[in-house]
Amino acid sequence: MEPSPYAPGSLPEYLAGRGRERDLIRNKVSRLSMLGRSGGPLLAFHAPRGLGKTSLLRMAQRDAIADGFLTAWVTGRDDRPMSPDLAQALSVAVKERSFGERSKALLHRLDQIQVEFGIPGMKVGATLSADDDKVPPGAAILEELLEDAGRFARNHEAKGLVVFVDEFQEAQLGDRKSLLIGLQHFDGAPDATPVAIIAAGLPSLPPAVTEAATFGERSRFVELGLLSDVAVAEAIRVPAEHHQVAWSDEAIMAAIELAAGYPHKVQLIGDATWEVARPTPGSTITIGHVRRAEEEIEDRMRGLFRTRLDRATPEQRRFLAAMAALGDGPVERARIAAELGVSTTAVSRPRQQLIDRGYIEAAGHGRLRFTIPGFAAYVRDNG
């Protein structure tokens, strides 16, 4: 049997349905090399979990490396400053490019920062506001890191620096502020600093940006949605073709129906069906294989739903139960409040909390819907 080419929970072999988003990133990054200047304001992708934000950024990082850019990857955390993580990521990137003696001074500085600010449990910038111009030392160093690494890349046969920040909304306020201020300074500086920052996070990302800096509203916010039927078919068919394995048209249609456009479930379907079919080069996966894999697919989805529901507070669970009781589709907020026997203002807090966590989303004025297909049914059975 060929190894499964599907990757639930990690970077897929083939990223389908995100061509527009990858083009947006390429256009942003191209400013560094084509115009010799910064990438401009933050480009940020936001969506609930399971819609492929991290996979999009990882694929974009591969693209940037292949195009000759220096890149760094960091993940936002509220329990430690970002500067030592960024310094470490930059150090690895510089060493991989084999700049030799030319990078000695930069690598020494990066090592210093990791030692100076890499203190477990260190809290930086917890009390800042968007209108506070002060940035704490651990966060202020971020701008210096970006400037030094960006100019080093420009001067040493790299086109510029592209930093990818996952879970941006989780970063400490001082770090978010410093990154945004750095981008603003680089964009207006007479001496070009070729740096671009691409971010991803939950639906709470946009307010986390504007909380850090009011001018953050000029960032480009892009919401990721469910995949189209065509994209689901590509995500299923193309990885198998790389292993000389085909899917019948009936099997593809069954996968599309099961997935309901949810990227994480697409990978589950591919992986579970592959394990059932145990294909070899030249063989075909049939609708029978898909049907035999359904129980495993749905069991793994129930595990995801269970974890999600367990993390909700009692107040949030009551809101979810009331919403699910009204059906799978978009539901009016007033009907949810009526189901709970309270006023519409009384549901404002759990509503916003659930939106920020990516459990539900707005579906037009005064209407809400679940972000994961099938979650409403699970809540009705288990809420």
Image (spheres, grey):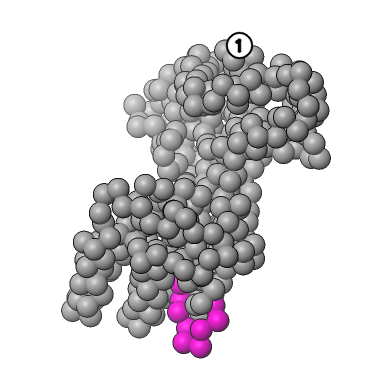
Name the quadrant containing residue 357: top right
Label the magenta part by its dominant secondary structure. loop
Q: How many marks?
A: 1
Residue located 51% across and 70% down the image: 133
Up-down: is 255 above or below 214? above
> Is residue 228 part of the magenta span, yes or no?
no
Give the quadrant of the N terminus: top left
Residue located 57% across and 65% down the image: 131
Q: Amino acid at mark 1?
A: Asp
Q: Is residue 211 left or right of residue 128?
A: right
Q: Is residue 128 left or right of residue 211?
A: left
How far from the left and from the top, in percent, is residue 90?
31, 64
Q: Is residue 136 left or right of residue 258?
A: left
Up-down: is 160 above or below 199? below
Up-down: is 68 above or below 129? below
Name the quadrant containing residue 40: bottom right
**Which residue is at the front of the view, 312 or 10?**
312
Up-down: is 135 above or below 376? below
Residue located 37% across and 61% down the image: 72
How far from the left and from the top, in percent, is residue 80?
35, 51
Residue 360 in sight: no
How far from the left and from the top, in percent, is residue 54?
47, 47
| Residue at the extreme top of the image, as rendered | 381
Q: Residues within 10 Å of mark 1 (few under 14, many from 20)?
A: few
**Which residue is at the front of the view, 212 or 283?**
212
State the SS at label 1: helix
Name the quadrant containing residue 370: top right
How far from the left and from the top, in percent, is residue 26?
54, 64
Can you identify the residue that label 1 sits on?
A: 381
Give the residues drawn in magenta, as a range: 187-195
> Is residue 194 part of the magenta span, yes or no?
yes
